[in-house]
Amino acid sequence: MNVAERNLGPLHVTVIPFQDALSAVTDLAVETPGQGHAVHFCNAFTLALADSNANYSKVINGGTFRFCDGMPLVWVGRKLYPDLGNAWERVYGPDVMSGVLSAVNSRAHTIRHYLLGSSPQTMARLVDRIGQSWPYATLAGFESPPFRAPTSLELRARDERIRLSGANIVWVGLGTPKQDYEAARLAQSCGVMAVAVGAAFDFLAGSKAQAPAWMQSAGLEWAFRLASEPSRLWYRYAWGNSRFLYSVGRRQWLTAASRKLQDGDEES
């Protein structure tokens, strides 16, 4: 599959229609056993963090796929790269997870899913939801790690459990940016496809409400989530959205200035 990539701020994002993204994740998980692949979903906050942290930017850009999870990235991408307009679609983490789980073709049946993250209560609800809604999906294992930094011994034990489970895909729901670091680590240490899916566990389990479809398509999901959890998310969106606009605007200006200088050199 020919997948385009373009720069948005500090990120080198994957430009791909949603259905093609589903196929790419499924096919790669099945066709490359033992080869690690990290998958990241990028939104305005991801880009803002990457713009302020070179190490985090390196982790995201080192992934196999860096999908545009947020509509603002899609809009900016279409504006900056109109030649790829038809390919710029939102590839939303929860939709990718539910799409892969719901696949019923023979190839998808070989996938063994491992769930890592969230609270024990949400995890129990998620496992139950998967059993009811996607009965053909095979769960290789699941665990909810403590809300603290794991020890090296705990990480080794985690890796061993994942290897012994025979998982093809590990869905990682530990919150941004923690889940992105862990997805990159798991891809390397366990040779699995590790997918950092953010709040997908909460949404699919029904622990948290999702924004209505019209708000998602209008790029207003952040406002819905902020209204739902203002004390936890106010700083994320106040800082993240402004940093996103600054980063994209600055780099667009620098690119335009560079092109103008090159044009001037050619004319002289």
Image (spheres, grey):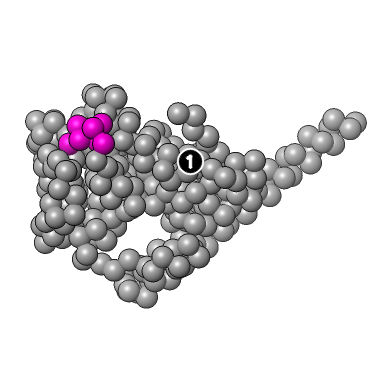
Q: Within the image, what quadrant is residue 158 found in?
A: top left
Compared across the picture, whether 209 is left or right of 43 comes to left
At a point 13% along the width and 42% down the height, the residue shown is 139
Of the pair 227 and 166, the residue shown nearer to us? 166
Q: Is residue 109 visible?
A: yes
Q: Nearer the viewer, residue 57 or 17?
A: 17
User: Which residue is the extreme one toward the right?
Assistant: 268
Horizontal side of 12 relative to 201 (left or right) equals right
- How packed is label 1: few (under 14 Cα within 10 Å), some, or many (20 or more)? many
| Residue 91 left/right relative to 195 | right
**On the rendered image, what quadrant is the C terminus found in?**
top right
- In the image, is residue 135 above or below residue 12? below
Which contiguous range is marked in magenta? 105-112
Can you say whether 260 is above or below 35 in the image?
below
Q: How many marks?
A: 1
Percent from the top left, x then y, of residue 263? 82, 36
Q: Residue at x 31, y 35 (%)?
A: 26
At a point 32% along the width and 74% down the height, the residue shown is 228
Q: Is residue 202 magenta?
A: no
Whether residue 80 is situated above or below residue 109 in the rendered picture:
below
Q: Is residue 8 visible?
A: no
Q: Residue at x 49, y 29 (%)?
A: 2
Quarter of the picture containing the N terminus is top left
Looking at the picture, how far across and down is residue 114, in whole percent?
17, 41
SS at badge 1: loop
Residue type at the position of mark 1: Ile
Residue at the disc numbered 1 = 16
